Amino acid sequence: MDKSQISTDEKYMQRCLQLAANGIHGARPNPMVGAVICLPPDPSKGRVSCRILGEGYHVRCGEGHAEVNAFASVRPEDEVLLSDSTIYVSLEPCAHYGKTPPCAELIIRKGVRRVVVGCVDPFAQVQGRGIQMLREAGIDVTVGVLQKECMWLNRRFFTYHSKHRPYIILKWAQTANGFIDDHGKALQISNEQTQMLSHKLRAEEDAILVGHTTDSREHPQLTVRHWHGPNPKRLVLTRQRPLSQLVDDLYQQGVQSLIVEGGRQTHDAFIDAGLWDELRVETGQHLTVSDGTRAPQLPFDVAIQHHIQYGFNSITTYLNMK
């Protein structure tokens, strides 16, 4: 494959990711998936550039998948062009009958020439079966275009099915000199913008947890009142409940993601148990206190995902590299 083909594949896979992200609320517990149907250039037929014939994403669980919606958006007069077309899909097309028929069968029936897949679906009923079905039908299949980005988009879904637990985000705010409160009293560190982002995060995750001390001392609402979307399931960690049992219970309940917004003791418990995937630390860079509760210590095996400045506050996201 030449470099121009690679750049074209990446361009349209990026579009798939943009479309897929629109399903952040409705697609759960299914993964977010985007699909783009392109007619490649063919100078012999007067086509000098790619033409998009259809687009779609998985809007709502139980309804049409991305591929179904993409094909549905193709104009009737363009159906004849599908045999020369490529369909880009951010996640492997399904090969099993669930709430909807298999998308791999639909692609075969539509007769497209080529399929480009972002990443393989880890779900037990798929796991390469969709790709195999397409190849056995004689369709040219390319796998792994923008694979890292495609996997990141559905990190909750992948973690849930591969580790049999929710994707766990530890989140706290600290002063410039490393305290999370002021002499044991609650301290407002977030600014208006970072508070809004915090509520946006809540709307994107299934559940949120605080420790019993934080709950009794601060009575946090843990809602999305400064954003839009569903409130996460509210949980309080008691001294009597082991973390392993908690995350197993959440898995059995179908909870795919969990935010932990507790105090030092709660965060330390998750870190010590190795039960975390992402760590978000907000720092008020112009705010200090003389004493209080020290912020949790970062684990050793972390990698910075990104660092963003919001006024006098910054948010650094770390990933668990174990």
Image (spheres, rainbow, N blue to C red):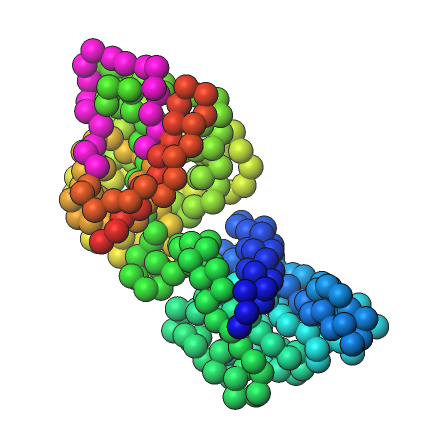
Query: Which residue lies at the image location 47% right of the left edge and 45% below the top edge?
Result: 204
Q: Is residue 212 above or below residue 56?
A: above
Q: Is residue 289 visible?
A: yes
**Farthest residue toward the top?**
290
* Res. 64 image quadrant: bottom right
Residue under the image location 55 percent in, 51 percent down: 21
How many numbered marks does the figure carry? Answer: 0
Q: Which residues are magenta?
A: 281-298
Is any part of residue 231 visible from this angle? no
In the displayed structure, 224 sits above or below 134; it is above
Provide residue 203's location: percent of width, then percent of height: 48, 41
**Horizontal and vertical percent position of residue 226:** 52, 29
Q: Position of residue 111 (x, y in %)?
A: 67, 82
Q: Main secondary structure of the magenta part?
A: loop
Q: Is residue 122 left or right of residue 50?
A: left
What residue do we see at 42% from left, 32% from top? 308
> How far across and down, in percent of the image, does residue 9 sit?
57, 64
Q: Looking at the image, is 289 positioned above or below residue 191? A: above
Residue at horizontal 36 percent and vertical 43 percent from the top = 305
Residue 309 located left or right of residue 142: left
Would you say 68 lies left or right of 260 here? right
Closer to us: 73 or 138: 138
Magenta-colored stretch includes residue 11: no
